[in-house]
Every structure is written in C-alpha cells, then in structure tokens.
Amino acid sequence: MSSNEFKIYIAWTIVNIILFPVLQFNFSRNIYDFTYKEIMPQLVYGIELLIIAMLGVVSHFRFKRLLKNLKHEINGVFMTSRIQHYQDLNIVLSMTLFLFSISMVTLTADGLTQTKRLNQSKFYADFLICNVNVLMAAIWVPVILILHPKNGTRRSFALDS
C-alpha cells in the first residue's frame, strides 16, 4: 500500500464519520419521504461495502504477486504459509462482503421505488433480510480470524520469527 493510498483511506474514514449523521439529518426533513431517513444511509453503506469487497479482490492479487516474489527468497517457505492463510481469509471476507452488499443494496434500492415490489412480497423481503443477517454474522468469522489467528498459525508465526 502506497502512502497516497493510505491517505485516501484515512480521508475516506473521516468523510464517513461525518457523512452518515449528515445523511440521516438531511433526509429527516419533511420535504422527503419519511422512509428516506433509514433507506439512504443503508444504501450508502451497502455501496461502500461493495467498494470494500472490490478492494478485497485487489488485495488478493497483491497477495498473489507477493507469493510469487517469495518463491525466490530463503525464508519464503515459512512466509508463504502465513501469507496464504491471510489470502484465504481475504477471499472469504471479500465474498461475504460482496453478497452482503448486494443484498443490502437490492433491499434498499427497492425501498426507493414507487411500487416497492420486493418489499411487498413477504418471501423476497424475508429472503433478503435473512441474507443480510446471516452474512453479517458470517463476516465476523474471517475478521476475527484475521485479528486473532488460530493457535497453530500463531505458533508457526512464532517459529518463523
């Protein structure tokens, strides 16, 4: 990650700290439909998660390039297992974020339409809501495994150092 990329992520974080309360405040005014107060922040959240899932794909290719470069290193075998572990977790996290964001965007975008076809159908609405809830729980698994690696991995990390 370059210095400029890091600065962009910091700026994105600061903008998001301000963005969501402003969105909720703006759409709570009487000139908008009362549902927009909830729908708009959720729609922006879903779109941002879709962008983060795409950044996960970029990270996958960066891991791949790093693994390719490690083949020629002396300690490459030890580092390769470590990086492959995180690459696998990155794939799982990216896929769950992608599916979560698609379900969230579909559900909220339907709330913006006049007919609200998906929300009128109990099956489709429940299906998308269940997807969002189950995938939110599934997102926590790779996040926890990234932050707290399994014991065998942690032991092999200590042996590598």
Image: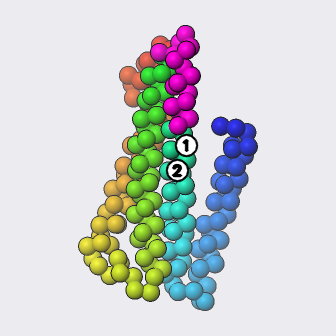
Residue in the image at 44% along x and 22% along y = 81
Q: Crowding near pointer 2: few (<14 within 10 Å), some, many (20+)?
A: some
Instruction: Identify residue type, mark 2.
Output: Met
Residue visible at 39% across and 29% down? Answer: 150
Relative placement, left or right, of 88 versus 63 is left
Relative image position of residue 77 (x, y in whole percent): 47, 15
Residue 101 percent across, percent down from the top left = 45, 59
Residue 125, quarter of the rendered image: bottom left
Q: Residue furthest bottom?
A: 31
Q: Is residue 161 visible?
A: no
- The residue at 33%/56% (across/down) is 134
- Residue lying at 44% horizontally and 54% vertically, measured from the top left: 98
Element marked by disc 2: helix
- The residue at which mark 2 appears reads as 54
Residue 18 horizontal/vertical position (percent): 67, 63
- As drawn, the label of residue 79 is none
Q: Which residues are magenta?
A: 61-77
**Viewer-proximal residue, 133 or 84?**
84
Query: Dots 2 and 1: beta carbons under 8 Å?
Result: yes
Marking on residue 58: 1
Q: Quadrant of the C terminus?
A: top right
What amino acid is labelled 1 in the image? Val
Say if the magenta span includes residue 110: no
Q: Is residue 55 left or right of residue 113?
A: right
The correct choice, above or below, for 66 with respect to 40 in the image is above
Q: Quadrant of residue 127?
A: bottom left
Q: Secondary structure at mark 1?
A: helix
